[in-house]
Amino acid sequence: MTDTAGYGGPWKASAAEEFSPAASAAPAQKIESKYLRKFLTLEEFEAAAKRKLPRVLYGYAASGTETDASLRQNRESYTAYGLVPRVLMGKRKRDMGVSLFGRRYSAPFGIAPMGASALFAYRADIRLAEAAKSADIPMVLSGASLIALEEVAQAAPGTWFQAYLPAHPEQIRRLLERLARAGYETLVVTVDVPVPGNREVDKRNGFNVTLKPSAGLIWDGITRPAWLVGTALRTTLLRGMPHLENYRAVRGPSILSRADIRGGGAIERHGWAEIRLVRSLWKGNLVVKGILSAADARLAQDCGVDGIVISNHGGRQLDGAVAPLRVLPTIREAVPRLTVMIDGGIRRGTDMIKALALGSDFVFMGRPFLYAAAVGGADGVTRAIHLMREEIQRDMVLLGIGSLSELDASFVSEASCWTSCNRMNDMNFRTN
Ligand SMILES: Cc1cc2nc3c(=O)[nH]c(=O)nc-3n(C[C@H](O)[C@H](O)[C@H](O)COP(=O)(O)O)c2cc1C
């Protein structure tokens, strides 16, 4: 049995049966490291990553834009709903598997695309993809990643790819050809970055995926020796200076280059015609990421996409953009038959359950997995996946369900006092 400590008495025997990997068809994932077994929540990975990473890198991952309003609301939106469990439902088996695009995954969550991940841990994209593959969940390789997409596909077949569409149709066609040649089957096109968000933290820190070396930056690295040796030196000595490998059909500039990788303002002028073009060229599954309005969800559906990700880019683009969970019910209603996924602020099994109950087919998480990779490489990511699986498994028992497909809106209640009560408790706590 895995570490489901905390159960006692007569519960223990049946919990062992219910929670064993065999009972849930979960892929076996052995975490040997005593250090990693001490991590009991995803939040703990963030604290450890903050200690390990240069300030500049941690700032790039953790922050949002401007006032961080969307970043905060992403988390708060999940506390605005309470769960309504059923009891004595007599379920004997629990299955958290989910079918997506004709394939069965072992859990209802995946790893969101994150640019420049390989600055956080040695070969991080491969580590994330391998951990996801062995847990039988999807990982999305970012178009702003620093490891060639062919290498990732070879290490972990079944990985999804996320693209920022190039400006011109011919460049788009060539990028799609490269992806198809490498064996990618699911393409996620991110549409919420017509211009980069106003990332003031990064501006102050001199970070912009491409780095401007400065005395401050060098000092920042030197004072984090584990990262310096384990990631920065190891990468540059063994692999050379990282490049934006997958932004376009051909290898992009190095992270130290000042080149304009976005191609001027042409991307600002993209419209739904570009998505229709991709649809006509791409034979695999097509997902549009960064939808927040029901009208756009319908337009995406009209373009023939297979799915959408409701997302405000983890609060990293338009500050004040609504929290994805808030618009999920309306979007679900607008496109009842489309595959709808969501990300932003999900940190707990109960968060996922709420999103699924409100109509999402699947969820993604970003930052926690990047922190887990920074802290423990592939094993760190495996540990984080394991924790989420365990939480969902337990939540399903507590909710009285045997399958996630049983979830619907009757399992959630928009607790109007919930957020304010939480705030009051918080205030009382601080004043006492
Ligand atoms: C460091 C970092 C880099 C990101 N890079 C990308 C990217 O290249 N492409 C993309 O579509 N989204 C990117 N995102 C957004 C994530 O895919 C996802 O939407 C977001 O992180 C979800 O919120 P969460 O981190 O609260 O789970 C990035 C997020 C982070 C934290």
Image (spheres, rainbow, N blue to C red):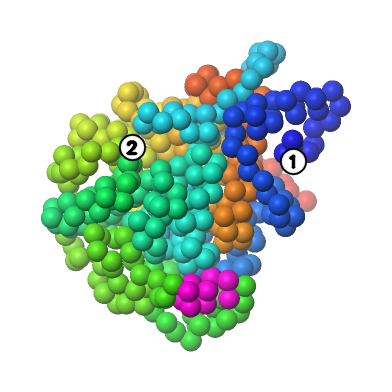
Dot 2 alpha-carbon crowd within 10 angstroms: few under 14, some 14 to 19, many 20 or more: many
Residue 181 in picture, x, y percent from top left: 27, 50
Disc on the earlier residue, 2 or 1: 1
From which residue to which does the magenta span run? 229-238
Residue at far right of view: 9
Residue shown at 69% from the left, 31% from the top = 20
Vertical placement of residue 366 versus 197, above or below: above
Of the residues shown, which amino acid type is indicated by label 2?
Answer: Ile
Q: Is residue 406 magenta?
A: no
Q: CA distance from mark 2 to mark 1?
A: 35 Å
Vertical placement of residue 395 versus 286, above or below: above
Q: Nearer the viewer, residue 301 or 249?
A: 249
Of the residues shown, which amino acid type is indicated by label 1?
Answer: Asp
Q: Which mark is residue 308?
A: 2
Q: Is residue 237 magenta?
A: yes
Can see residue 197?
A: no
Residue 150 in picture, x, y percent from top left: 35, 56
The quadrant of the picture occupied by the N terminus is top right
Residue receiving disc 1: 3
Q: Nearer the viewer, residue 57 or 105?
A: 105
Vertical placement of residue 159 versus 223, above or below: above
Residue shown at 51% from the left, 56% from the top = 127
Can see residue 127?
A: yes
Dot 1 alpha-carbon crowd within 10 angstroms: few under 14, some 14 to 19, many 20 or more: few
Residue 167 in picture, x, y percent from top left: 17, 58
Element type at mark 2: strand
Residue 154 in picture, x, y percent from top left: 40, 52
Total numbered labels placed on residues in the image: 2
Front tag of 2 and 1: 1
